[in-house]
Image: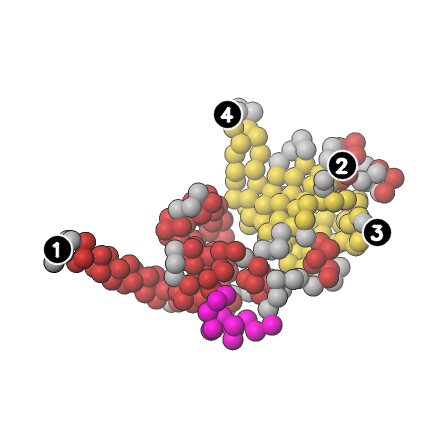
Amino acid sequence: MKISRWSFVAPLILLFASACSDARLEEMSALPLTPGDRAEATRLHQAALQSHRSGDYAASAATWALAAKADPGWYVPFYNLACATSMQGEPELALEFLKLAGRRETPANFPATVAADSDLAAVRDLSEYQSLFAGASASPDPVEQQLYGAWSSGECNPAAGFDLAGGAYGFAFAQDGSFTASVATGPSFRGDFTVEEEALRLHFQTREFFNPGSGELEETPLDTNGEIVYRFSGAAMCFSEINGGESAIHPATGCYCRAR
């Protein structure tokens, strides 16, 4: 019988990969729950997203591990490390990273996000997942269901309480707890949010703007918090107050309607 040299090499590759995975889990498990350098972690997070979207899951996993070490109190790198690991065909290991994410402060919609994320489909097939996330549903509560999606001031009649003289403003709230905010003639912001009864708590992570000197879009990391006081008025969502320090989009109060 002819035996290819790969008959010997392949098991060694698998053994090496398993050892690396075990080492990463041990390293991530040893990290404290305390906050770190959120700006650096955000920079690494954005780089990991690019790798992940291109299908390079090994690179995205490695970069999210660095982000977790930069800010070990932030759940986002651990969650996304689980996603990247699942996409590499290691659902059991991915579940361990999900557990680490759950040990950090997470938004209220965290279980629903896990239940809906397509990257974690293989993880949800595990019996241990079923016991850990029993009752988790991909359907958010009614308030969050009403919130998710893209909203634009340009879709609303000025009579609804919005002054369009400054241009159109927009927000988009995603089920994974992330948001984007932009103004037609100015910068855009990205971050994550949590939902409260009458307010949205925002954490601004990055600011993107056009630099006329270089002729390119530039992105700078942020680590500031904000708050939106909101209410629903029929089909519109109205902001009566927006606080966000240097990240505030002024004067983006008023009513927003669903973007088309």
Residue that badge 1 annotates: 2
Residue that badge 3 annotates: 234
The verdict on residue 130 being magenta is yes
Disc 2 and disc 4: Cα gap in Å? Answer: 30 Å
Q: Residue at x 56, y 63 (%)?
A: 115
Q: Do the residues under discs 1 and 2 have CB atoms within 8 angstroms?
A: no
Instruction: Determine which quarter of the picture holds residue 95.
Output: bottom left
Above or below, 56 relative to 128: above
Q: Nearer the viewer, mark 3 or mark 1?
A: 1
Q: Visible in this render: residue 203?
A: no
Percent position of residue 147, x then y:
71, 54
Disc 4 and disc 1: Cα gap in Å? Answer: 61 Å
Percent position of residue 94, x then y:
43, 63
Nearest to N terminus: mark 2 or mark 4: 2
The disc at residue 214 is 4
Nearest to N terminus: mark 3 or mark 1: 1
Residue that badge 2 annotates: 154
Percent position of residue 83, x then y:
46, 57
* Chain part drawn in magenta: 124-135
Label 3 secondary element: loop
Disc 3 and disc 1: Cα gap in Å? Answer: 74 Å
Amino acid type indicated by mark 4: Ser
Label 2 secondary element: helix
Above or below, 143 relative to 63: below
Amino acid type indicated by mark 2: Gly
